[in-house]
Image: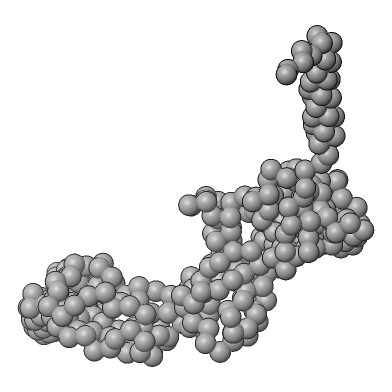
Amino acid sequence: MDIQRPASVARQKKLRRILLSVAGLVVVGLVSVVLGQLKPAAPTVERATVWVDTVKRGSMLRQVRGLGTLVPVDEARRWIPASTQGRIERIILRPGALVTPDTVVLELSDPQAQQSLSDAEQQMRAAEADYASLQAQLETEKLTQRSVAATVEADFNQAKLEKEVNEDLNKDGLVSSLVLKQSSVRAASLDTRNRIEQDRLMVAEENNRQRLLSQKARIDQLRSLYELRRQQVDQLRVRAGMSGVLEQVPVDVGQQVAPGANLARVADPTRLKAELRIAETQARDLTIGQVAQVDTRNGIIPGKVIRIDPAAQNGTVSVDIALEGELPRGARPDLSVDGTVELERLDNVLYVGRPAFGQEQSTVGLFKLDPATGEAARAQVQLGRSSVNTIEILGGLAENDQVILSDMSAWDQFDRVRLR
């Protein structure tokens, strides 16, 4: 038969449940507090997958790098323009051929130029014939004038002689004064006429000389026109104009070209310079005369900066490098090269390899290694001036510190990583 439990048993059981619940809540709270004070576990990174470098103190050479090409110096490359209009008749040489100044690259045809040359030659020959005819005519006129002058001079000399004879006879009373006076008048008249004829002869000779000069000037003018037409016809055979290599022939047979159109380009492959494209953010310290090195992948050529483009294009600045060393084998125009320009040498500075992310004069977060624990903790590092592969450290790191320079963006949410 059932025995009824006293009421105190039920109260004790209820009290025990309450105490157990309270104890459980206290334990959960204590565990939560302890777990909250614990640091999150650091993720593990394979050491072989990151780039670790050591902070050093000493001299740091600042450089900037840029890609570019080899191009002929300005006076070693030229376009060959068309001197006259015409049609491309024949292309004799193709790009890559070695040429000299007299090498014919291509030929043009222009019937109008040929006709103009023929007309100019005929006009010049006709003017030369007119000059010869005029010269003969003036020579005849000059002889006639000289003959007249000689006759007058002879008459004057005879009249002068008669006057002198009459003067002697008059003194002896053999000739009357009237006869003497007549001979004197005739001598004076012939003297005046003789002087006039001599002056007329001089004027005629000067006039003949001027007429010949005028005709000769016309001949010279027509000869110059003929030479111009002849040169235009000769220039239908387009020559290289310099020694070098034929680079381009941007025309086709049968194409009609106008005066001044580019027909071919010739360059001297032994006189080259490098055109580098430097990022505009790195070009502000560039100056004329700085030392440079150009890597052709087949040798390194020393050089110096000779020109800096004042304007930037597509985020880069064009810089010309004069090559001062012997060109390596295989160097040719339009060859891709890699060049570096030395800006300055910094003495007694802290520096490290350039991190994957971080520009000069900025502050970045880098993971600094702790050799004792094998972990790397994030540190705020102040960067200074940069070079191609190194960058100056202004704060946040000390000499011999080791930092991770590779891309750690995958662990941006962590302040510590463990290397293994």
Q: Where is 360 relative to 68, above or below?
A: above
Is residue 351 among what the camera can see? no
Relative image position of residue 319 (x, y in whole percent): 57, 61
Q: Nearer the viewer, residue 81 or 364?
A: 364
Q: Nearer the viewer, residue 131 or 261?
A: 261
Q: Where is 272 relative to 32, above or below?
A: below
Tell me the quarter of the picture where residue 56 sits. bottom right
Residue extending farthest to the front is 1
Relative image position of residue 273 (x, y in whole percent): 55, 73
Horizontal relation, residue 302 to residue 366: left or right:
left
Tell me the quarter of the picture where residue 207 sits. bottom left
Residue shown at the point (56%, 89%) measured from the top left:
329
Residue shown at the point (55%, 55%) measured from the top left:
317
Tell me the quarter of the picture where residue 60 sits. bottom right
Q: How is the image coloured?
A: one colour
Q: Nearer the viewer, residue 162 or 277?
A: 277
Is residue 40 among what the camera can see? yes
Residue shown at the point (35%, 89%) measured from the top left:
97
Relative image position of residue 299 (x, y in whole percent): 63, 83
Residue extending farthest to the top is 7
Horizontal relation, residue 353 to residue 218: left or right:
right
Q: How many numbered marks, from 0 up?
A: 0
Relative image position of residue 63 (x, y in whole percent): 71, 62
Residue shown at the point (67%, 61%) measured from the top left:
64
Q: Nearer the viewer, residue 225 or 375?
A: 375
Query: Where is the C terminus found, in terms of image quarters?
Result: bottom right
Query: Where is the N terminus found, in terms of image quarters?
Result: top right
